Amino acid sequence: MSTVALIPARGGSKRIPRKNVRLFAGQPMIAHSLRAAGAAGVFDRILVSTDDPEIAAVAREHGAEVPFVRPAELANDFAGTDAVIGHALEWLAVQGQPAARFCCIYATAPFLRPADLRRGLAVLEETQAATAFSVTTYPYTIFRSLKFNATGRVEMFWPENFTKRSQDLPAAWHDAAQFYWGDTAKYLAERRLFSSNSVPVEIPRARVQDIDTPEDWEVAELMFQALEAREARATATLPV
């Protein structure tokens, strides 16, 4: 059985219209994820699950397969990633082409590196977990976070931490929203990318940015330019 990359990319993005094919750093957004998947060298197939003809055409142009049209009920604002991945895995099984392992890669992950994907696969295999997914740290400890109360004043969620130094509080992590490796048989038993049998794959915070709003997009483009400049400087200083 094969190892498959599955990239969900519906056409109906509301907050950033046509987000998955909008140009980012000179390329359609989805092309960055497709390039990382191809360069990782660990996938037998790279599939895009979409309901949108333009996204399908762009995906094929950048080397992906689009062997089916995603059903309308899985392309609305309420369809979750687990349902989309489950549909793709079931489709492959019905075609007699089941995947032993899969990696769900988001179409809006321009900071994804091929090495991250290879490391995620290694973690999945070493731990024998159901899934392994990208995580990163919060930039500031959540254990000193604040909320507005009924009078419009602020108070701490955890007032017992008021006198504690941030460095003495535990680190907190969140989903980096880049990739989710899965053992197909174990995953289909629960159909949850995040479960008690999931393991983390740490990603540097400097390479993580949600892209859900126009402001997020602007920040991501600035980050991308900065990272490219840093990598170019590093390459220029390598011995020849």
Image (cartoon, rainbow, N blue to C red):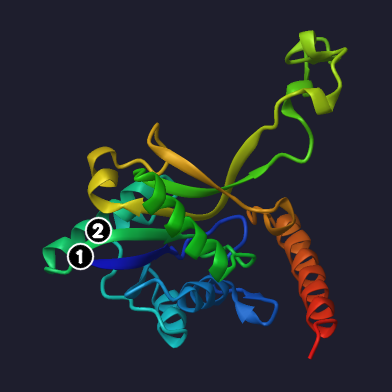
Q: Is residue 168 above or below residue 73?
A: above
Split into 4 quadrants, where in the image is the C terminus?
bottom right
Percent x, y of residue 224: 74, 69
The residue shown at (73%, 62%) is: 220
Q: Could you tell me the amino acid type at mark 2?
A: Leu
Q: Secondary structure at mark 1?
A: helix
For this rendering, which residue is in front, 82 or 118? 118
The answer to which image quadrant residue 89 occupies is: bottom left
User: Is 214 on the left or on the right of 179, as rendered?
Assistant: right
For this rendering, which residue is in front, 227 or 63? 227
Asked if residue 18 shows in the view, the reply is no
Q: Is residue 145 above or below residue 58?
A: above
Q: Residue furthest front?
A: 239
Q: Determine crowd level at label 2: few under 14, some 14-19, many 20+ residues with C-alpha closer than 10 A.
A: many
The residue shown at (46%, 65%) is: 11
The residue shown at (73%, 28%) is: 142
Q: Is residue 178 above or below residue 56?
A: above
Which of the labelled discs sits on residue 123, or is there none? none
In the rendered image, which residue does mark 1 sit on? Answer: 92
Percent x, y of residue 194: 43, 39
Disc 1 + disc 2, Cβ < 8 Å:
yes
Q: Could you tell me the amino acid type at mark 1?
A: Leu
In the rendered image, which residue does mark 2 sit on? Answer: 89
The residue shown at (80%, 23%) is: 168
Percent x, y of residue 230: 82, 72
Q: Secondary structure at mark 2?
A: helix
User: Is 68 on the left or on the right of 8, as rendered?
Assistant: left
The answer for how far apart the CA atoms under marks 1 and 2 are is 5 Å
